[in-house]
Image (cartoon, rainbow, N blue to C red):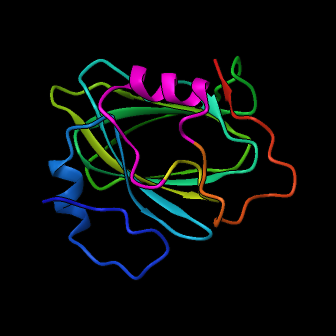
Amino acid sequence: MTIKDIGPEPQSFDLEKATLENTNYRTVAWSGKYLQLTLMSIPVGEDIGLEAHPETDQFLRLDAGRGRVQMGPTKDRLDFDQEVEDGWAIFVPAGTWHNVTNIGEEALQLYAVYAPVHHSPGKVHATAADAELDEHSGNDEPPSWSVQPAQQPSDEHA
């Protein structure tokens, strides 16, 4: 299945199938004016990376694999610690430090919905290193037509 991010236009596709077929660390599947959908594949033993988004709420849903989600008010105080698996949802409030680690024996397949939009439409990152490089170089910015907070503080990464 090939998904093409067509921006803030009506879109419909089999989300579970697209999530399970995605082999990239992150694929931006749809970008709206107010929210965005990304597909993620986290290899065995790897993680999303400890981070906090000051102005971005997130919803994540696992469609395959087993993981461990940790969240908290600071990067040194992750007092929420839960094992999750296929079918589970994760809700990350804005400003919360969080990480999801693949603790299973297969790729962790999930999708994430961000509000507001967080990435460039249609952006594909094969690996977490590619995503980090693009973020640091300014090559992964929300589109100008998306609605962003008046003052957008930078995301934080551990």
- Residue 137 painted magenta: yes
Q: Residue, x 25% and y 26% (percent of image)?
A: 43
Q: Quadrant of residue 138?
A: top right
Percent of width and height locating residue 85: 29, 44
* Image quarter of the N terminus: bottom left
Q: Residue, x 60% and y 57% (percent of image)?
A: 143
Residue lying furthest right in this view?
151
Which one is in front, 50 or 135?
135
Q: How many labels does the image show?
A: 0
Percent of width and height locating residue 50: 56, 25
Q: Residue, x 69% and y 21% (percent of image)?
A: 75
Percent of width and height locating residue 41: 28, 37
Classify residue 55 as left or right of residue 70.
right
Which one is in front, 83 or 95?
95
The relative height of residue 95 versus residue 88 in the rendered view (above or below) is: above
Classify residue 26 as left or right of residue 21.
right
Classify residue 139 as left or right of residue 146.
left
Numbered range of the magenta stretch: 121-140
Q: Residue, x 33% and y 26% (percent of image)?
A: 127
The relative height of residue 50 versus residue 54 in the rendered view (above or below) is: above
- Residue 54 painted magenta: no
Classify residue 5 as left or right of residue 138.
left
Q: In which quarter of the image is residue 158?
A: top right
Percent of width and height locating residue 124: 35, 42
